[in-house]
Image (cartoon, rainbow, N blue to C red):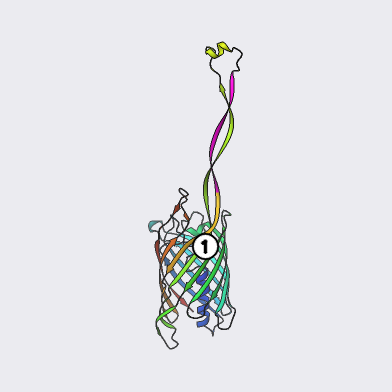
């Protein structure tokens, strides 16, 4: 998600890489799962109206790296719970070398989410995403970019740089593919953010004022004085304009905990996020403060 959504673009790519490696004897396989997210966010941004969501997903993955994924979005905010829509993402995962140290992925996503939905992705119509990865074994470094098409033509560019380390706590099974691992991850988000800026303009305008009445001493001394006098007056107007800046958006630290059992995978990921340069749309002032969120989910590959 260039977004923070764990089943977003980077999730597809990582899932395709790992599942393809584990299922070399099949040309096409499938992955389906369910994920709960305590607060759906976008590039480290948490909208004031954002809600917890349930995200069922289904992915068709080719051994050659092609994949097609679909995600459903369900608002699970108590009595207001409702289905909000879905997204569809075709993509391709590739590698530049036989050891798969250098690789990447490209994809495009179409959103079918109602405009009145409280989830933050409802403002998007579609996106084009790409990423490059370097994985020498000790760590994995990823650079990603996303171009977001807004429903109101307010398009955005989002980039992120991610560094992670995969640590197996224990491995089990004949092929040592089962077990428990943690993946400490740090992600820096940058990109454009649109907001409304208030400014003021001053101008000189002419205004006519009535001269003193007929009984005024001035009129008695100067009987031919004009009935009106033109004066200059300064007028200040408050105006607003949309501003778009490319800047640091957020820094995220997360710790995915993953347990793999044959074809099943169970995960829990806590996030601690620090937004930067965040604009409050209520008063156009910057806001701040860390916030916590988490995801929990399960999936099966067949």
Is residue 66 among the parts visible in the rendering? no
Magenta-drawn segment: 227-241
Q: Residue at x 52, y 62 (%)?
A: 190
Is-magenta flag for residue 238? yes
Q: Secondary structure at mark 1?
A: strand
Q: Residue at x 43, y 68 (%)?
A: 253
Residue projecting furthest to the front: 221
Residue linked to disc 1: 190
Place of residue 13 in the rendered image (x, y in percent of width and height, measured from the top left): 53, 73
Left or right for 7, reference 225: left
> Of 127 and 192, which appears nearest the observer?
192
Place of residue 272 in the rendered image (x, y in percent of width and height, measured from the top left): 40, 65
Q: Residue at x 55, y 33 (%)?
A: 234
Place of residue 11 in the rendered image (x, y in percent of width and height, measured from the top left): 50, 71
Is residue 184 among the parts visible in the rendering? yes
> Of 206 and 115, which appears nearest the observer?
206
Q: Residue at x 52, y 69 (%)?
A: 9
């Amino acid at each position: 998600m260039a977004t923070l959504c764990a089943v977003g673009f980077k999730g597809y790519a990582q899932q395709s890489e790992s599942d393809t490696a584990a299922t070399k004897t099949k040309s096409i396989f499938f992955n389906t799962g369910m994920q709960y997210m305590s607060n759906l966010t976008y590039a480290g941004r948490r909208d004031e109206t954002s809600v917890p969501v349930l995200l069922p997903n289904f992915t068709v993955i080719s051994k050659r790296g092609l994949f097609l994924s679909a995600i459903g979005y369900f608002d699970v905010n108590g009595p207001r719970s409702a289905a909000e829509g879905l997204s569809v993402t075709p993509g391709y995962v590739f590698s530049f070398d036989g050891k798969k140290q250098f690789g990447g992925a490209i994809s495009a996503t179409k959103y079918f989410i109602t405009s009145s939905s409280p989830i933050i992705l409802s403002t998007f119509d579609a996106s084009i995403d790409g990423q490059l990865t370097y994985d020498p074994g000790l760590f994995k470094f990823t650079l990603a970019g996303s171009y977001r098409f807004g429903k109101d033509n307010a398009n955005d560019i989002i980039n992120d740089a991610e560094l992670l380390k995969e640590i197996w706590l224990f491995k089990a099974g004949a092929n040592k593919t089962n077990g428990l691992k943690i993946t400490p991850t740090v992600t820096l988000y940058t990109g454009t953010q649109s907001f409304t800026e208030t400014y003021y303009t001053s101008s000189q305008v002419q205004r006519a004022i009535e001269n003193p009445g007929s009984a005024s001493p001035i009129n008695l001394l100067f009987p031919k004085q004009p009935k009106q006098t033109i004066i200059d007056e300064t007028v200040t107007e408050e105006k607003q304009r949309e501003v778009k800046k490319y800047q640091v958006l957020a820094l995220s630290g997360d710790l995915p905990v993953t347990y793999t059992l044959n074809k099943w995978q169970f995960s829990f990921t806590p996030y601690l996020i620090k937004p930067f340069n965040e604009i409050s749309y209520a008063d156009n002032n910057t806001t701040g403060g860390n916030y916590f969120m988490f995801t929990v989910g399960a999936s099966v590959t067949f």
